[in-house]
């Protein structure tokens, strides 16, 4: 379960980071 949560959290953080950088 930890692996799945980590992946989901990582994806969310990456998406937020990308969005912030684009803006």
Image (cartoon, rainbow, N blue to C red):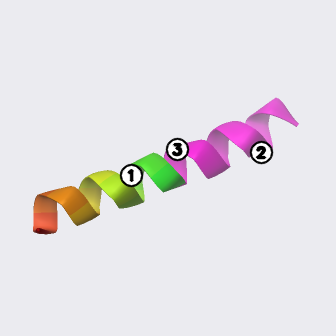
Residue 15 shown left or right of residue 23 in the figure = right
Q: Which residue is mark 3?
A: 10
Q: Which residue is mark 1?
A: 14
Mark pair 1, 2: CA separation? 15 Å
**Coordinates of residue 15 in the picture (x, y in percent):** 39, 60
Secondary structure at badge 3 equals helix
Residue 20 appears left or right of 16 = left
x 52%, y 54%: residue:
11
Earlier-in-chain disc, 2 versus 3: 2
Callouts 2 and 3 close, C-beta under 8 Å: no
Coordinates of residue 13 in the picture (x, y in percent): 43, 47
Tell me where residue 1 appears, x and y as whole percent: 88, 37
Q: Which residues are magenta?
A: 1-11
Q: Magenta-highlighted stretch: main secondary structure?
A: helix
Q: Is residue 1 above or below residue 7?
A: above
- Which label belongs to residue 4? 2
Q: Quadrant of residue 16?
A: bottom left
Task: Please tell me how crowded label 1 is: few (under 14), some (14-19), or many (20+) other residues with Cα within 10 Å.
Answer: few
Looking at the rendered structure, the secondary structure element under dot 1 is: helix
20 sits to left or right of 4: left
Q: Is residue 3 magenta?
A: yes
Q: Earlier in the sequence, mark 1 or mark 2?
A: 2
Judging depth in this view, the residue of 6 and 16 nearest the camera is: 16
In the rendered view, tell whether residue 8 sits above or below residue 22: above
Q: Residue at x 25, y 65 (%)?
A: 19
Task: Assess whether mark 1 and mark 3 are in contact (beta carbons under 8 angstroms).
Answer: yes
As drawn, 23 above or below 10: below
Q: How many numbered marks, from 0 up?
A: 3
């Amino acid at each position: 379960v930890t692996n799945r949560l980590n992946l989901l959290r990582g994806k969310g953080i990456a998406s937020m980071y990308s969005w912030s950088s684009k803006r």
